[in-house]
Amino acid sequence: MADFTNIDWTANGTVCKAQQLISSLELNPTITCLTHGQSIGLALTAEASFISLSAVLVVFILIWRNVRRYQRSFPNGGWRLLRVPFDIYMLSLFGFDIMQAMGGVLDVRWAHGGIVRTGSYCTAQGVIQQIGELGVALITIILTVHTFVAAIWRVGLRACRFAFAIVGLAWVFVALWVGIGPSIHKHYEAPTPYWCWISSQFSGQRLAGEYIWIWFALFSSLVMYILLYFWTEGRLSVDEDKWYKFYTHKPEQRLAYSQRRAALGMLAYPLAYSVVVLPVSVARWLLFNHQAVPSAVTFLAVSIFNLSGAINVLLLVIIRPRLLLFIPPGSSVKTEANISQPALNNSAAPAGATKSDQNLPPTAVGLDDDMKGQVRYPNPGLPGNNMSFAHDSSGRMPGNP
């Protein structure tokens, strides 16, 4: 046993008793004694999580308001909250953001008490953080891949059933992986060391249950954003006959500004995720390889990571404000894309368009609408109001079979 007889027990300002501090210094996996500086660092990580939690909760309140507003404006229905796959992904992403933020807010108890120890509270924090962090990583991967495929090959722009299925599988995987560990292992969730998460005794579960997904999300986000950027600049193209063949060449005709913004806009979420997850990934990789990381560096990296929910909300407001019914009924949205086909109005409807087609409620505009051009939403209070929709080469209205 190590010799602790010459230790100044008050030097670090810990509130632990002598035996607790000895256990903490011996790297006992069931307890960590925090210094005053570490308690302050934990308070900062909790504040960052609280900011994200508040921001995401406000978004859910606004979504509820949007639903109620559309119910009043269109009592006969005909509209949906989850109209395009990206609506489904964003709603699920915000759900996991709440869980991740809640896990960080629970640091308040450790910061106040100065001791992190195993128990029901510790287990709850570990489980909640696992659900949030693993879920956010999975949805980020799904969002990244689907955005890339939709932009490059124009596939899956309205594949809501696929989106529901893949998101459902993600939730099931998270529930099973997170639920099985604590149920079959004692002290599965333990101090690590400043908060509770998967114990260091289960390094394989750490890797397979979170690290690998976070790092894959980081890698795929960076790679696909770069490829999509070169595609929008006309430096990258896809073989028309063999979809899996890519060609690089000198810049050709680049996409219009709004089309580039639409294509790159949805990848802003995974790109932002890469920015906030990179510092904490480096810190965790060093810890995973048993290298010392200053606590101040860890708290700074985790504080940035805990702001990811607030950053996602900010991106929704700035880049994707037309998702999840955030466009008021009767409003008009115009993108700057070059419209390859003329817009429609009541006097010039395409063949096969019925009167009901011309009085459709607004859609949750997705990537395809942004890439095509103008979408004008009907005002239910103005009879005979003209509205125009971009349409594809088949003459079909967006959202209609």
Image: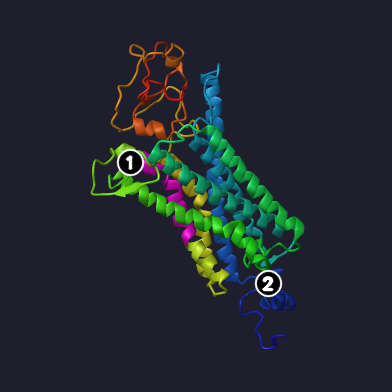
* Type of amino acid at the residue the image marks with label 1: Arg
Task: Identify the disc placed on residue 15.
Answer: 2
Q: Residue at x 51, y 45 (%)?
A: 142
- Residue 121 visible in the snapshot: no
Image quadrant where one finds the N terminus: bottom right
Q: Extreme front residue here?
A: 241
Q: Is residue 264 left or right of residue 122?
A: left
Residue 331 % position (x, y): 41, 25
Residue 194 % position (x, y): 62, 66
Asked if residue 268 lies in the magenta stretch, the reply is yes
The local secondary structure at tag 2 comes to loop
Q: Which residues are magenta?
A: 261-278
Going from N to C along the chain, the mark reached first, 1 or 2, is 2
- Residue 163 visible in the snapshot: yes
Asked if residue 122 lies in the magenta stretch, the reply is no
Q: Residues within 10 Å of mark 1 (few under 14, many from 20)?
A: many
63 in relation to 116, above or below: above
Q: Residue at x 30, y 24 (%)?
A: 341
Q: Quadrant of residue 295?
A: bottom right
Q: Residues within 10 Å of mark 2 (few under 14, many from 20)?
A: some
Q: Quadrant of residue 344?
A: top left
Residue marked by disc 1 = 260
Task: Identify the disc placed on residue 368.
Answer: none
Q: Main secondary structure of the magenta part?
A: helix
Count the marks.
2
Residue 296 % position (x, y): 52, 69
Residue 300 % position (x, y): 50, 63
